[in-house]
Image: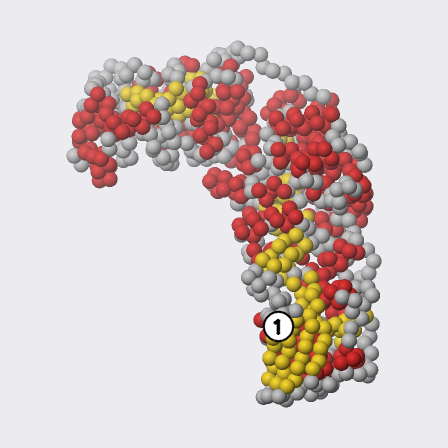
Amino acid sequence: MSGEAEGPPWPTWPDGFVLTDEDRRALLVLSALRTITPRRLIDLAAERATAAAVLAHVRGGRAGSDGDRRFARSLDPNALAARAEASGARFVTWGSPEYPSQLEQIHDPPAALYVIGAPLPDVTRAVAIVGARRCTALGREQAADLGSALALAGVTVVSGAARGIDAAAHEGALSAGRATVGVLGCGVDVAYDPGGRDLLRRIGASGTIVSEFAPGTPPEPRNFPARNRIVAGLCRATVAVEGAAGSGSLITAEHALEFGREVFAVPGSVTSPLAHVPLQLIRDGAGMIRGSEDLLHDLGLELDAQAVREDLSDAEVRGLGALTGPTLPERVAATLGIGLPEAVAVLMELELRGFVRSVGGRYEATLKGAAASAR
Amino acid sequence: MYGRVNGVTVVGVRGHLVVVEAYIGRGLPSLTLTGLPGAAVQDARDRIRPAVENARLEWPLRRVVVNLSPGNLRKDGPGLDLPVAMGVLSASAQVRSAVLAGWVFAGELSLRGELVSTPGILSAAVAAARAGSRGIVVPSANAPEAALVEDLEVVGAPTLGDVVSFFRGAWTPSPPVDDRPSGDGRHEVDLSEVRGQAQARRALEIAAAGGHNVLLVGSPGAGKTMLARRLATILPTMSRPEALEVTQLHSVAGVLHGGLVRERPFRSPHHSVSAAALLGGGAGYLRPGEVSLAHHGVLFLDEFTEFRRDAVEGLRQPLEDGRVVVTRMAATATFPARFTLVAATNPCPCGFAGDPVRRCRCRDDRLQGYAAKLSGPLLDRVDIHLTVPRLTKRELLDEAHAESSSSVRQRVEEARGRQRRRYATLGPICNAQLPGPLVRRESRMSQEARSMLAAAVDRHGLTGRGFDRVLKVARTIADLAGIDRVMPEQVVEALAYRASTPATELERVG
């Protein structure tokens, strides 16, 4: 350790790993190989010094699986480059000016990234929001609220562009009219699902889409832990909204801690399986935030736009007040002393305005509704 | 040696008079049937001789030819046993042909000469009356249904021997007895037995009042089946013509027991049902399917997503036209099938999405596939989508009173009356059956209701069809309240029963 004056305590890319065009082409091929993980690639790089030499090594059959050796021999770097270009992606390599400097400080930094859209933000202006794909409606509202608040405070929201919390965070930022960054666990030209395609298009239109995987790489489960280290690595802070035990959000937050970045978590009920990750993180010392106000305060940020206030009628206030957790409409009718049809009408009016949501035949206040009735 | 009597064959639900001619000529003892007899009629050949002999009558030991006319109509079903036997008895002069004139015969024979209960007797009796016949002779088990036809003498006979005795003046039939409870339709279940589920009860009332189809979404044990069964009990009491139609269909299908069906039918076929059994059909003899057995009543499809695709697709025609046309190689039949559809399904494959206590454990791709199944064109015809919560014990105990079916039915009948008067020029339709182009004109919306709905279109992304469905339901809610113009309150309540798109349904997974 004493010999190394600076740099992180883990191996990184040797100087001059990607110097020539041949190295760039070699790296295109290497990014498409399955058994050559970033970790393995770094080891090989330390041995072989340049990307071209590493590829020759692989093609020679001295590293990687048999399948990859054959694949590496058949792959045409020009075709890969053309495919990346067709999807509008740039190939950003280690050491190039566009390579985000914050990734130089993480372990197993990607040798190269495929980037679509705007340049990646500075680490001080990027915050990650992560959480479960299968989340609750409340979690989605929280993520969207955090996303739009961060965006309005001038911070770029980074997330994984998956469904659930990720999508809500991106949507929050987009609804504030700001750019956001989506980091993918597949090729930049691949969408997780049809709904995801539309989200990616809108993220890419104003913000950035990033992946270290070659175009055409399918979203395999093993890609996601790797994706998560980039999400955490790009940001000064990571916020976990909802996550079940053993989920990827915990991995992302752990990466963030490892890289010396801040971690925040939105707590939930101790009985909720989706509160497992946030509560675990809070126990481990993550900052507990109750919402966007707490987060902005802890990050030393301020909203640069006035939050829009909505006013409620008396009937609506009473309707909201009758909701204690998921409530049957007949309970609301009884509490308000009105008939069921009238109670359903009040609840629907509230739902139309976004203060109430219906869940499996019951009604409950949304985040917005809870905030409004607290005022 | 010639005899001639009248029989009936049933195609679909319609009876057609068939002239049965018998000729006894020289030759080895045999029975030949001509005139396009179907498989079931051919089948009767070997049965008729033992039946005749066991009735202590004589079978002519000569060559017997029986012809069924008109020759271009395929005759099927077992009801022709009796006329064929009577034709032979007439030809062999065991019954005087003069006394048989003007009578129609229908019924299946057993080997011992008994007349056994036969499907389609009501249709036969209707055909006989239409042809101006004097009377009809049927198995005594079917006499109550035949007796529903006015201006027709009905002889219900237990055996072939009794039929012959009747025409010899040696036997008198007892008048047909209908052992069903008379008067108002009686159901075995009642809405008052449902505990809690106020919103579901309200939705059923709206569905009954406007004739709307319903989709019930809920976890196992939420009470979907219980609710669906009770929809039939709050529909308006059937008129006599309606009851006759239902009785006729049940008779043709062979599921009728006794006389007039007074209570609205409730049919709940299992999800493994074939398209033919659901919609009608069968090889040769065309039987009405479950959709027709549910005519004027409720067709309940539990586990809706599990039904075979071809069966579900086939529901579109009856939902649209109120009838099914079944075409087979041999024949085409039209069966009436105007029913209220109640489809029920779990919110997700595991059944617990949205449940406050149990967590849904479905994989994403399965959820998406499930949502796609719930968005077909069929569900475009379902106006009321309702999520039925699984109640906790406390919520069940909370419930104070529950209204009985008969008092709800009263409101439903009043609402239907308003629709009848409003749509007097359009025919006998209710709100659910309003044709698309007329919905917006006939629903009589107030200006405020209109702008309310416009706002909802923006917020909820309602489609054109979804818009019309909300409109129809709002119209029905106004009819229940006795209001002429639809006000915003009714629109807002109707929105609670709108179809959530599969995407939002997925988002509710928690």
Task: Give SS at disc 1.
Answer: loop
Q: Is residue B258 visible?
A: no
**Which quarter of the picture shows residue A331?**
top right
Q: How many C-alpha atoms fall within 10 Å of the one at disc 1: few (<14), some, or many (≥20)?
A: some
Does A11 sit above or below residue B290? above
* Chain containing mark 1: B
Q: Position of residue A19 (x, y in %)?
A: 21, 18
Q: Is residue B383 visible?
A: yes
Residue A154 falls left or right of residue B381:
left
Q: Residue at x 16, y 34 (%)?
A: A60
- Is B156 in front, or is A99? B156
**Which quarter of the picture shows residue B65?**
bottom right
The number of discs equals 1
Q: How is the image coloured?
A: secondary structure
Q: Position of residue B62 (x, y in %)?
A: 63, 88
Does A314 sit above or below residue B120? above
**Which quarter of the picture shows residue B256?**
bottom right
Q: Residue at x 63, y 42 (%)?
A: B381
- Is A16 in front, or is B89? B89
Q: Residue at x 37, y 31 (%)?
A: A186
**Which residue is the site of mark 1?**
B35
- Is B31 in front, or is B309? B31
User: What amino acid type is highlighted by mark number 1?
Assistant: Gly
Quarter of the image where the C terminus of chain A is located: top right
Q: Position of residue B205 (x, y in %)?
A: 74, 43
Does B363 sit above or below residue A133? below
Q: Position of residue A356 (x, y in %)?
A: 64, 28
Q: Residue at x 27, y 29 (%)?
A: A79
Quarter of the image where the N terminus of chain A is located: top left
